[in-house]
Image (cartoon, helix red, strand yellow):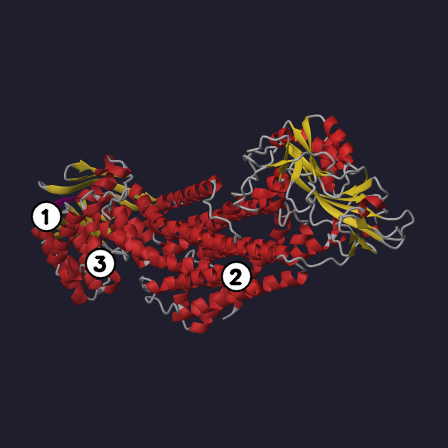
């Protein structure tokens, strides 16, 4: 792929005797939305974790925007994630003790931003996701869809190169799921952010530019679908 | 609910087993200390009853106007008895002199053979001192040692007592002597209220951190436990059944802990018995409550633990799964300070009543203890409010990620975050009270050379015409004695002081001595002045006509200041004197008063502080680790998103530091306020004095221990948030 932001080749990863990834080659273009599908236990999450530098593969390389993650130390990978990668999880994983605003501001503060600037950025992203009036609320006082949009704002607030979203709408009803997904993808496309989306749901995957299917730790050859 | 299902639910995981083990250990520590403290409390009067033989209960001797006494002739059915306080190298020795006729029928206590003049029995502690000191410094004062006093005649193993056989006529000349048919066996229950008050307060100081530790340990794995109980609710168990399950779990753990605690109390007794209480160490039996008390303690602790667990589970009804969604604690309000205010008001009021109305002092003492407990719990109740107030303000200015995360948790969970440090805060409060009071008392009792007061090198002995020459000669012969001074009774019986040579007056420490051959010096004031009166002024000698024709009243040995010389002078003067009063020095005068008591209180206080701080630091470590494990999902997410471990450590440290910093200073300040109230109301004219270096060392030490306790959790924080550990959370 000519303008690949993420480039993975020969990825292998085992947990004890269980081989989770058995040699995966994958490129994701800059600004592309990629859906990763597959049955439970197929290796989707392991693939995402290796691509994001959360796990170091046993074999193979992962390059994001020219940086070979497999050559970095754990601390350097953590720093890279903080600066270049955003995450959205199934249950939002917001910090329950912080307001929506502070949750979004947190990665900026972790990166060394000043409080005032971080809060301003957080308010900007909350506003873009339609949550301006929820900024002071705690996650516990919000609906699931609202909390998930806060998580998306948090993922995008650092203006990452790529957002990894693991079943981002899995805990929501279909209407909320649709709203949240659209909000995330719209915001990502406006900022030309690459999105790698894990999902079981074909309707969710349909929003992606392309989808790949993972089976038994391999990309299913016939299943890479470009839209 | 069957026992089998309860076992599955309660012991099904390693985490649950660890939690139960923690509760058992915490209860065991608490019960071990409770048993020892209870035994001490209950047996305190018994210790004094064993020394009934020292109590003078007979008729006083007839004393004429000139001070001479008239005693009955010796008979076989009565004895003369007198007692005095002797000193050796700063140690108090209680001397009981008994005079009986040669064919006496008077039974000596506990089967001891009657003594003849020149023989004595000594407690093991005194016998040990005799073995280690030259005879001319100590043993010669009493004669021939013929045996040791049994434990049944002593308050404790380190009690320094001697029972001396004395000639009838010697005791008969002692105005303090009594004639009685035998040694007292009943004694009297001395008022040990003060010690019991102190013991009660000390017990609160040590047991509060332990109770908090148990409370913290019982919260280990709370989230997982909540989920399991919620599942039990889902499959059909009612609210009461779940509460019963919790009661069963806690009841079994506390029962096991209580039994272990009773066993642990046995070795603990041996250590605790070495502490000096009311002037003596204890025999291990003195720290052992009766079997009925032990059984009652085990039952009480078990029932209490089960009842509290039942009530908490019933009140907190976990509901079905999903209902355990993370919630903020109920908002804490300023009303929490009310308990503190009530406690402080009650405390000041009861102290004032105890000071101004002696008739009501017993009731006031009870209120004083109760209000102290209210104050202590008031701090624990008010702590979350203060924590929330400070962390809320801190959250507004926090700029670092770790500070924002910590402030968020502190603001939403002030109860649980303060609970981690509550033990330390309570310990610092109580120790500040002790340190403030003890320092104020000790401030005036540490003897030092003061102008116009009796030199610390001088040993003073009362004398009369019959013994003075012998005393002077004996003192002169004692090695290390540089000068012997005789003070004479003035012609005017109402005059305060004795007449002596002006040079002699200067030699014993008098200042502003008039330019006269003889002067009148108030040696009583020079000896006791600062011990009895905080504002004592050095007495000013006045010119006198001379010593010609006057009777000796005191003989003083001016020594080279070495401890050995002082003891030799004391021994020489004692042997040659009338034996009614022991020779003394200003160091003894100070040591014999409040100093000994305050010293032992200080030791007890700092030991209590060490225990309370140690347990509190342990509680803080457990609470910090528990909180880290409880939030491994949150922390794991932060690490996954790129937060460095150092910043996570910052979160953990800040969550301990903010409640500690916001409440520790307040509790120390409140402790000093309470100490000040005690000193100005019950201190009998004392002035409040800031504590010595030991207190500040303890305070810094407790802060360092807190830091260590938090640092001990860093490894857990790092391990439990490794990506491999949390990626499936």
Q: Earlier in the sequence, mark 3 or mark 1?
A: 1
Are the residues at dot 1 and dot 2 in contact (C-beta closer than 8 Å)? no
Element type where label 2 sits in the image: helix
> Depth check: B471 or B335 in front?
B471
Report how many numbered discs are placed on residues in the image: 3
In the rendered image, residues at marks 3 and 1 fall on the same chain: yes
Q: Nearer the viewer, mark 3 or mark 2?
A: 2
In front: label 3 or label 1: 1
Instruction: Examine the rendered structure and indicate whether residue B130 appears above or below residue A226.
Output: above
Picture layout, residue B90 above or below residue B82 = above
Q: How far apart are marks 3 and 1 (CA)?
A: 22 Å
Q: Which chain carries label 3?
A: A
Query: Which residue is rendered at x = 79% and y = 53% of the image?
Result: B61
- The span shown in magenta is A26-32
Q: How dense is the environment of label 1, judged by Cα within 10 Å: few (below 14), some, or many (20 and up)?
A: many
Residue drawn where x is 44% and y is 67% of the image: B312
For residue B583, above or below residue B329: above
Residue where numbered disc 1 is placed: A31
**Callouts 3 and 2 close, C-beta under 8 Å:** no
Closer to the camera, B308 or B589? B589
Evaluate whether residue A188 shows in this view. Answer: yes
Q: Distance between the residues labelled 3 and 2?
A: 82 Å
């Amino acid at each position: 792929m000519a303008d690949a932001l993420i480039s993975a080749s020969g990825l292998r990863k085992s947990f004890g005797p269980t081989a989770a990834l058995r040699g995966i080659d994958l490129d994701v273009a800059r600004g592309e939305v990629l859906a990763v599908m597959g049955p439970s236990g197929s290796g989707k999450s392991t693939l995402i974790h290796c691509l994001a530098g959360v796990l170091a593969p046993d074999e193979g390389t992962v390059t994001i925007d020219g940086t070979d993650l497999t050559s970095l130390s754990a601390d350097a990978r953590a720093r890279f994630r903080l600066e270049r990668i955003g995450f959205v999880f199934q249950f939002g994983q917001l910090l329950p003790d912080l307001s929506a605003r502070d949750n979004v501001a947190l990665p900026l503060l972790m990166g060394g931003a000043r409080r005032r600037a971080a809060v301003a950025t957080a308010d900007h992203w909350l506003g873009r996701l339609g949550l301006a009036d929820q900024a002071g609320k705690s996650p516990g006082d919000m609906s699931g869809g609202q909390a998930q949009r806060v998580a998306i704002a948090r993922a995008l607030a650092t203006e990452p190169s790529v957002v990894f979203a693991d079943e981002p709408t899995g805990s929501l009803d279909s209407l909320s799921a649709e709203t949240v997904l659209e909000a995330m993808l719209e915001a990502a496309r406006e900022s030309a952010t690459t999105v790698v989306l894990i999902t079981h749901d074909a309707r969710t995957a349909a929003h992606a530019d392309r989808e790949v299917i993972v089976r038994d730790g391999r990309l299913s050859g016939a299943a890479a679908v470009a839209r | 609910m069957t026992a089998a299902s309860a076992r599955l639910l309660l012991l099904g995981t390693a985490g649950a087993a660890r939690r139960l083990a923690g509760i058992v250990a915490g209860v065991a520590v608490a019960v071990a200390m409770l048993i020892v403290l209870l035994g001490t409390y209950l047996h305190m009067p018994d210790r004094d009853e064993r020394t009934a033989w020292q109590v003078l209960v007979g008729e006083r001797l007839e004393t004429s106007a000139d001070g001479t006494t008239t005693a009955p002739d010796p008979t076989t059915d009565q004895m003369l008895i007198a007692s005095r306080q002797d000193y050796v190298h700063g140690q108090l020795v209680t001397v009981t002199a008994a005079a009986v006729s040669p064919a006496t029928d008077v039974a000596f206590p506990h089967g001891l053979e009657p003594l003849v003049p020149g023989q004595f029995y000594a407690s093991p502690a005194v016998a040990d001192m005799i073995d280690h000191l030259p005879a001319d410094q100590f043993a010669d004062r009493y004669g021939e040692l013929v045996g040791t006093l049994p434990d049944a005649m002593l308050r404790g193993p380190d009690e320094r007592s001697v029972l001396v056989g004395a000639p009838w006529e010697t005791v008969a000349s002692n105005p303090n002597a009594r004639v009685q048919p035998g040694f007292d066996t009943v004694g009297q229950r001395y008022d040990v209220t003060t010690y019991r008050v102190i013991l009660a307060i000390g017990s609160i100081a040590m047991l509060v951190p332990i109770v908090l530790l148990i409370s913290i340990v019982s919260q280990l794995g709370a989230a997982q436990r909540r989920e399991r109980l919620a599942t039990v609710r889902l499959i059909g168990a009612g609210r009461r059944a779940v509460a019963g399950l919790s009661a069963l779990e806690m009841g079994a753990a506390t029962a096991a802990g209580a039994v272990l605690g009773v066993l642990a109390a046995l070795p603990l007794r041996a250590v605790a018995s070495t502490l000096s209480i009311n002037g003596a160490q204890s025999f291990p039996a003195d720290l052992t409550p009766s079997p009925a008390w032990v059984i009652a303690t085990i039952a009480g602790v078990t029932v209490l633990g089960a009842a509290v667990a039942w009530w908490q589970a019933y009140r907190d009804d976990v509901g079905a799964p999903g209902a355990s969604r993370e919630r903020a604690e109920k908002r804490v309000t300023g009303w929490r300070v009310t308990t503190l205010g009530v406690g402080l008001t009650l405390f000041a009021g009861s102290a004032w009543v105890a000071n101004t109305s002696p008739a009501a002092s017993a009731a006031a003492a009870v209120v004083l203890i109760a209000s102290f407990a209210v104050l202590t719990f008031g701090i624990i109740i008010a702590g979350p409010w203060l924590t929330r107030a400070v962390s809320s303000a801190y959250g507004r200015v926090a700029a670092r990620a770790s500070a924002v995360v910590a402030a968020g948790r502190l603001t939403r969970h002030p109860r649980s975050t303060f609970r981690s440090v509550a033990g330390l805060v309570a310990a610092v409060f109580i120790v500040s009270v002790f340190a403030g009071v003890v320092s104020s008392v000790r401030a005036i009792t540490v003897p030092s050379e003061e102008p116009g007061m009796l030199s610390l090198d001088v040993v003073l002995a009362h004398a009369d015409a019959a013994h003075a020459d012998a005393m002077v000669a004996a003192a002169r012969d004692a090695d290390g004695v540089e000068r012997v001074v005789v003070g004479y009774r003035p012609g005017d019986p109402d005059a305060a002081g004795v007449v002596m040579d002006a040079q002699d007056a200067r030699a014993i420490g008098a200042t502003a001595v008039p330019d006269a051959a003889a002067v009148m010096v108030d040696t009583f004031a020079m000896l006791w002045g600062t011990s009895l009166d905080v504002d004592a002024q050095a007495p000013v000698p006045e010119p006198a006509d001379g010593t010609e024709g006057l009777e000796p009243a005191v003989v003083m040995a001016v020594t080279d200041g070495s401890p050995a010389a002082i003891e030799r002078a004391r021994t020489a003067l004692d042997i040659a004197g009338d034996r009614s009063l022991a020779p003394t020095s200003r160091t003894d005068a100070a040591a014999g008063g409040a100093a000994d008591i305050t010293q032992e209180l200080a030791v007890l206080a700092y030991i209590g502080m060490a225990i309370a701080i140690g347990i509190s630091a342990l509680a803080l470590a457990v609470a910090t680790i528990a909180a880290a494990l409880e939030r491994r999902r949150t922390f794991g997410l932060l690490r996954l998103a790129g937060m460095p471990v150092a910043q996570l450590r910052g979160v953990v440290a800040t969550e301990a530091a903010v409640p500690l910093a916001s409440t520790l200073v307040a509790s120390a300040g409140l402790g000093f306020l309470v100490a000040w109230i005690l000193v100005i109301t019950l201190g009998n004219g004392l002035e409040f004095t800031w504590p010595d270096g030991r207190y500040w060392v303890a305070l810094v030490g407790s802060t360092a221990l807190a830091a260590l306790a938090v640092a001990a959790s860093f490894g857990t924080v790092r391990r439990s948030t490794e990506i491999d550990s949390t990626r499936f959370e």
